[in-house]
Structures are given as structure tokens and as C-alpha cells.
Amino acid sequence: MTTPSLTTTRLLRAPRLFCADDSAPTTHVEHLRRHGPLPAVVGEHGRAAMLTTIEHSGLVGRGGAGFPLARKMRAVAAGASTGSPVVVANGCEGEPASRKDVWLLTRTPHLVLDGVELAARVVGAREAHLCVHRGSAGAGTVRRALVERGKTEGFSITVHELPPRYVASEETALVHWLNGAEAKPTFTPPRPFERGVGRRATLVNNVETLAQLALVARRGAEWFRSVGDPTEPGTLLLSVSGPPQVSQVVEVPTGTTVGAALAQVGVDLEASTGVLVGGYFGTWLRPDVAASAPLTHRGMHAAGAALGAGVVAALPATVCGVVETARVATYLAAQSAGQCGPCVNGLPAIADALRLLARGPWDESLAPALDRWLSIVPGRGACRLPDGAARFVVSGLTTFAADVADHRADRPCASSRAGAWLPLPPVQSRSAGWR
Ligand code: SF4
């Protein structure tokens, strides 16, 4: 895949998360000039009032699960009896097709840090951690931004760089790593909001959620609700790609259809055979289904997909969907943390079958086994890697059914069998470090 330089397109009359000059990180002075100071949250009354504002805004987590932020914060604040709560900002962008988090961290680090600080004040935390993958461009930008801001009495934010693995961005993996262990997911319960860093109640939120929080705190619930779908208001950051040569991070109102989001950045849906929504844990949709599917949790669910990491990738018709599905399945199989049998054994078996289907010659006796593996791996891991991988593969086999039929019959399919369109980092061996 040729990746054009990353630019943004202003889909909103007044973009909310992007800064005025999106070519360089915002300094703290510029940030305060644009957004104004962060409102004070003083005492129990101040915390309760801010929680009410967040609740009325309807802000839900932007990390994939879509959980209401106010409810999560109340649960963490209620767990303060186990010690001072902790806030964790998740900027580990494990999803290879996503670039929105690093975009935020490198362009508007102060908005994210404001969100971290505000979340800490609301839940009563004195300690916060901002996690990025090792080598992420966001680490340096955020560290410099922290120096600019200076010390805050009685409160600290520490930046951590975790191993750049797909499942290391899962919230239990972050907590496990911060507790001194490997960045591998752990079985739940307890979830981090119950018992997390240092066995204390821990609020883990994606950096986009925290940036949105910083805006809600300043401008209020009604302002936040004035854009987007009334039931899931606000805006979303998306990593959009597709033919002819588009690869951009964009901010769209929730409820925008996938077709509209693609069209506004110049992606030609007519030249695509499938749209991947959500990321590699996500779902391939037929272009006609994607075109009218609204970008909300409810809309995606109705289309058989999920918002996930905010990836919208339209596959060019010249690229084979079977080959691409096999490439990603192989990558996902290599991302197993090696802890759960169905994941350790099932995902490589699925990936092997997919590679055989993609490259040929196909062995028809594998078809029932592939169906069986795809049905038994979901729901049987500590994290959702097996579920996501199975969903991704099943949706690929369905969306590219005509190509699958050609591959099974060892006929040339409609597109080239050349792959390598979706971005994939180098596969690390399972024995490579998790610290
Ligand atoms: S399901 Fe796989 S990736 Fe997730 S914890 Fe288990 S072994 Fe690790």
C-alpha cells in the first residue's frame, strides 16, 4: 500500500479536536489561547457538578467499547476506599491501520493532558500514567508538553512506552504492565475500575476520549451535544483510507455514514470491493452496505460491524480481498500472548488455512475444519483477540464470497492476487519481549 503523507480534512465547520495549524504540535500558550483555561474542579460539589455535565453530554469512550464515561468515572470514584484511584490514558495504538491517537498526541498533546488532569480531579486521583507504544512519535511530544506545563501540586503524570504489540493496548494488559509484569491481557473480573494499578480502582481511557472530555469540561454538555447523532453525540476521529490514494485522519460528526466519510476525503467507493470498519478486530462490509451505515455504535451494530478503533479502509478493486484477509489473519495469529489454548492453537490453524486459500492450491477437505475453528475460538480467551480475529475472517469470507469461490476452484479471481495493501508491522516472534 502506498501511504500518502498524512493530512487532515476539515469535515466540520469548526473542527473540535484538531488545532488551528495542524502541521505542528500546539504549544501550551497557543493551546490556552484557543481553548482557554481548564475549569477548576473544587471539592465534592465541584466533582459532582462535573460528573453531571459529563453525564449530560452523552460522551462515551472512543476506544471501541463505547462505555459511558460518567458511569465509569463514578465506579472508579466509588472504589476510592481501596486507596487513591489512578488514571491511565491509553495512547497505545496497537491497531496497525489506525493513526488517530498518534495524530492527537503529536498535534494537540495539551488537550489530551488536560483530559487526563481533569479525569484525575473528578475521580480523586493523584497519579496518572500515559501509555504509548515504544517508538511512538507521541511519546516525545507529550513529554515536551509536560515540561512546558510544569509541575502540578499533589499530582503527577508519567509517560510510559510499552512493547509495540497488538494486545498490549488492551486495558488489562496496560494495568498488568504498570504493575511490573508483562504487557499481556489478564482474565476478568476484576476489571481495572475495580482493581487496577497497585490494586487500586483505575480509570483507563483512550486518549481521544480524554481530549473530548477536556472540551466538554470547558464548553458544556449542550455544546458537545450540538453536533452528531442525538443518541451518541459529538465527533469521532477516523483513520480513513481507500482508492485512489487516500490515507487521512479526519474528524466527523457521529452518525455520518461510512459512504459520506469516504466521499468527503475523496475515496471512490465504486472502485472498492469491500470496506473494513473498526480495524483488524473489525468487519469487512460490502460497499453498498457500508455506504449507508451510520458511524455510531448502534448504526454499526445494525450493519453487523463495530466502530472499534475508528478505522475505515476501502479496499481497491485491484487488490484481492482473500489475500488481504489471509495477510491480516496471519498477523493476528502471531499476536497471541500465548496464554489461552484456543488462541494459541486456533488462530494459527485459521491463518494457515487462509494462506492456502489465498495462494492455492486449496484443499477442499479443509473447509469444514476452517468453519469449525472459526466457530469455536470466539469467547475463549482472556482478551478478545480470538473473537476479533474470527469476526474479521468470517466477514472477509462473506464479503469476498465471489473471490473465495474462484480461489476454491483455483481459478483466477477478479482482482489481482497480489496483496500487501493493508498496513502491517513486521511480525514479532512470540518469544520477543513483553516488557
Ligand atoms: S486470548 Fe490470546 S492474546 Fe488474548 S490473552 Fe489469551 S493468549 Fe493472549
Image: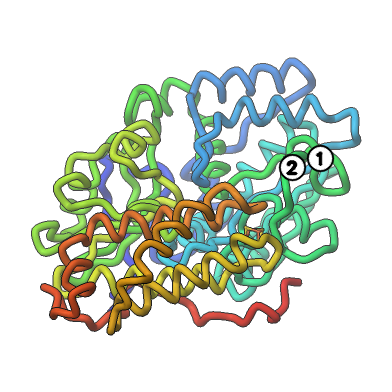
Residue 19 in view (yes/no): no
Q: In this view, does 118 lie to the left or right of 80?
A: left
Hey, which residue is sitting farthest front in the picture?
Answer: 365
Q: In which quarter of the image is residue 167?
A: bottom right
Q: Residue at x 76, y 72 (%)?
A: 435
Mark 2 belongs to which amino acid? Pro
What distance separates the C-alpha of mark 1 from that of mark 2? Answer: 5 Å
The answer to whether the residue labelled 1 contacts the one labelled 2, judged by CB atoms less than 8 Å apart, is yes
Q: In which quarter of the image is residue 116?
A: top right
Seen from the viewer's position, the closer of residues 260 and 354 is 354
Q: Residue at x 71, y 22 (%)?
A: 47
Mark 2, residues whose alpha carbon is within 10 Å: few (<14), some, or many (≥20)? Answer: many
Split into 4 quadrants, where in the image is the N terminus? bottom left
Which residue corresponds to mark 2? 192
The spot of residue 19 in percent (x, y) is 42, 52
Q: Is mark 1 within 8 Å of ligand 1?
A: no
Seen from the viewer's position, the closer of residues 228 and 360 is 360
Q: What element carries label 2?
A: loop
The spot of residue 25 in percent (x, y) is 50, 62
The disc placed on residue 195 is: 1
Residue 61 in view (yes/no): yes
Q: Is mark 1 on a helix, strand or loop?
A: loop
Q: Which residue is drawn at 48% across and 62% down?
A: 95
Mark 1 belongs to which amino acid? Arg
Mark 1, residues whose alpha carbon is within 10 Å: few (<14), some, or many (≥20)? Answer: some
Q: Residue at x 57, y 52 (%)?
A: 384
